[in-house]
Every structure is written in structure tokens, then in C-alpha cells.
Amino acid sequence: MANASTVPEPTPKQMLAACEAEAERLRDCIVDMEAGRFDFEERGVMFPDIEAYIREARTRLERLERYMDGLKSAAH
């Protein structure tokens, strides 16, 4: 088992790449939910409030984009 003190912290560029991938995933989810293609049952949600899920995904995406703006300035 690795000692936590020996594991290097991710660089801003690495964090930005991970955030960009998550932002893309959220965008795809939003598009799929809006188009009725998102499989809620596969995720264990039987009676979803689709509008609430879309709002939550948009909120998460907005927060992530603001965080990414800070990472972009640190990465350059």
C-alpha cells in the first residue's frame, strides 16, 4: 500500500484534464435527459423528476466550469 505522503499531488493541468472530461460527461447527460435518452432505470431511479435532474446537472456543470477557469489560470 502506498504511503499517502509519497503520492504526488496532481498538477493543475492534470486536474484541468479530469475536470474537462467530467464537464463533457455532464453535458452529454444533460443532452440525453432533455432528449429522453437517459436511462434512469439503469441507475436505479424508477420515477425520476427529470427537470430536477437537469437543473442539478446544469448547476454542477456551472460550478465545475468556474472551478476550471481557476485551474486554467494556474495551469498556464
Image (cartoon, rainbow, N blue to C red):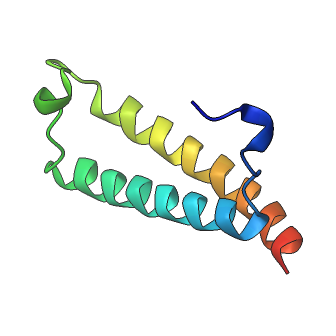
Q: Residue at x 71, y 70 (%)?
A: 13
| Residue nearest the viewer, comparing 75 with 55 | 75
Q: Residue at x 42, y 53 (%)?
A: 26
Name the image quarter holding residue 39.
top left
On-image quarter of the N terminus: top right
Q: Residue 16, percent across and down?
A: 66, 65
The outermost residue toward the bottom is: 76
58 to the left or right of 40? right
Q: Residue at x 88, y 69 (%)?
A: 74
41 to the left or right of 66? left
45 to the left or right of 72? left
Name the image quarter holding residue 3.
top right
On-image quarter of the C terminus: bottom right
| Residue nearest the viewer, comparing 45 with 70 | 70
Q: Residue 4, percent across and down?
A: 73, 33
Position of 55 relative to 13 (above/below): above
Q: Residue 9, percent across and down?
A: 77, 51
Q: Residue at x 72, y 56 (%)?
A: 10
Position of 1 relative to 68 (above/below): above
2 to the left or right of 4? left
Query: How many numbered circles are shown?
Result: 0
